[in-house]
Image (cartoon, rainbow, N blue to C red):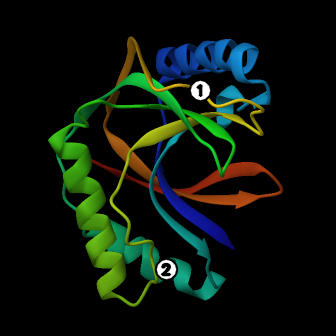
Amino acid sequence: MRLFFAIWPDDPGRAALAELAGRLVQVAGGRATPAESIHLTLEFLGNVEPERVPQIELIAGEVRARRFRVVLDRVGSFRRARVAWAGSDRPPRELMGLQADLHGRLRDNGFELEERPYSPHATVARKIERPVPRAPIDAIEWPVARFALVVSAAGRYATLASWRLG
């Protein structure tokens, strides 16, 4: 199973990100991420044996974090991955703490994770043909009260479980 932890935008946030995706595709080419698939990844687990899912769920249930607001206020792209993204100039402390807590607990339980610094962003377009210069945008924001364990199969995402933030 291909798994990751994510934060899903609320309906207004999703609509604003989908509209932004359409504008960026006009500039950079490629294809917009479907609105229902836009998310902010907390931690990518990759291919995981199904029998490890209960352990992952127990680990996630131990994470403690406060509710917060995501604010995405800039765009850019990753050239090698050929994706355009919306990111945050100053990610909320609570988001960074949530991700660090989750990352540390997973690593301490034997999961192999990327060790590069966490850079919160939502991928809004894929297979872009031209880079998107880093630039500020009108802020897109939404309240975050939950995080989720998500399975990716055949280009579709499904939430396996989710946890409330305090």
Which one is in front, 115 or 58?
115
Q: Residue at x 33, y 60 (%)?
A: 117
- Determine crowd level at label 1: few under 14, some 14-19, many 20+ residues with C-alpha closer than 10 A: many
Residue linked to disc 2: 54
In the rendered structure, the answer to whether residue 40 lies left or right of residue 72 reads: right
Q: Residue 132 bears which disc, if any? A: 1
- Determine crowd level at label 2: few under 14, some 14-19, many 20+ residues with C-alpha closer than 10 A: few
Could you tell me if the residues under marks 1 and 2 are in contact, i.e. CB atoms within 8 Å? Answer: no
Residue 38 visible here? no
Q: Residue 158 bears which disc, if any? A: none
User: Residue 72: x percent and y percent?
Assistant: 38, 25
User: Residue 115: x percent and y percent?
Assistant: 38, 72
Q: How many marks do you count on the picture?
A: 2
Q: Quadrant of residue 108?
A: bottom left
User: Residue 37: x percent and y percent?
Assistant: 66, 38
Where 19 sits versus 144, above or below?
Answer: above
Q: Secondary structure at mark 2?
A: helix
User: Residue 63: x percent and y percent?
Assistant: 25, 64
- The amino acid on which the numbered mark 2 sits, given as a three-letter code, is Pro
Mark nearer the N terminus (1 vs 2): 2
Specify the quadrant that holds the N terminus.
Answer: bottom right
Q: CA distance from mark 1 to mark 2?
A: 40 Å
Where 64 sits versus 76, above or below?
Answer: below
Q: Residue at x 22, y 34 (%)?
A: 68
Q: Secondary structure at mark 1?
A: loop
Q: Residue at x 25, y 70 (%)?
A: 62
